[in-house]
Amino acid sequence: MILVAVGASEFPFDRLLRAIDKLPEGEPLVVQHGPSEVRPAHAHCIPFVPQETLAQLVREARVIITHAGVGSILLSLTNGKRPCVVPRLGRFGETVDDHQLDSARRFAQAGLVTLVENPDHLSDAIAFAETDPILPPLGEAQLVGELRTYLDAVVGRRRSPAPR
């Protein structure tokens, strides 16, 4: 099964959902679409799901395609899955800015996600996911340490001296 999750944002993510509609048929597809009006054909579409249900879907999925929300990425990683991540972008009205692109690139550099900056390339990402080994589930302590390192690097770069 392929799981697509756009998160709980109030912004639609139509660009991703339209690309999902272009994927080849043949495998069950579950799409958590949020507030979007787009409903990919040949998919079981649900607007929102409780966290426990989403976690179960992640565990059952062969491939996870998600927005680049940190919570969605961490849910995949803690369940031993390397998600295909499509960042929401401000210029398409999918979010307020491009923070998801920045964090997705960092997660990709760390080898934790498959970054898909152009949703038209999802088929390639899915093919890669078939050959890319699933990650061992990250334990809480290791995950917290890696996140702390990541956040220190990101926040550290953006810190400026306090005004005098």
Image (spheres, helix red, strand yellow):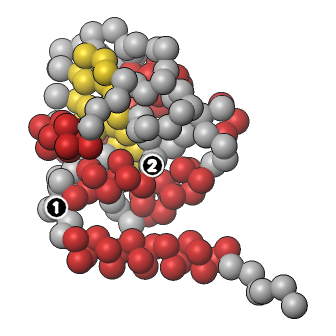
Q: Residue, x 53% and y 77% (percent of image)?
A: 153
Residue 69 is marked as: 2
Q: In front here: 33 or 149?
A: 33
Where residue 128 sits, quadrant-wise, is top left
Q: Is residue 40 above or below residue 125?
A: above
Q: Residue 113, position in %: x, y?
A: 35, 53
Residue 41 is marked as: none
Q: Is residue 93 above or below residue 107?
A: above
Q: Residues within 10 Å of mark 1 (few under 14, many from 20)?
A: some
Q: Amino acid at mark 1?
A: Pro
Residue 137 is marked as: 1
Please tell me which of labels 2 and 1 falls first in the chain: 2
Q: Residue 79, position in %: x, y?
A: 18, 53
Q: Residue, x 41% and y 44% (percent of image)?
A: 85
Q: Is residue 109 found left or right of 30 in the rendered image?
A: right
Q: Is residue 59 found left or right of 82 in the rendered image?
A: left
Q: Are marks 2 and 1 in contact (CB under 8 Å)?
A: no
Q: Quadrant of the C terminus?
A: bottom right
Q: How far is mark 2 from mark 1, CA to CA?
A: 19 Å
Q: Residue, x 38% and y 53% (percent of image)?
A: 71
Q: Residue, x 21% and y 50% (percent of image)?
A: 81
SS class, disc 1 = loop
Question: As drawn, which residue projects farthest toward the top?
Answer: 41
Q: Is residue 123 visible?
A: no
Where residue 1 sits, quadrant-wise, is top left
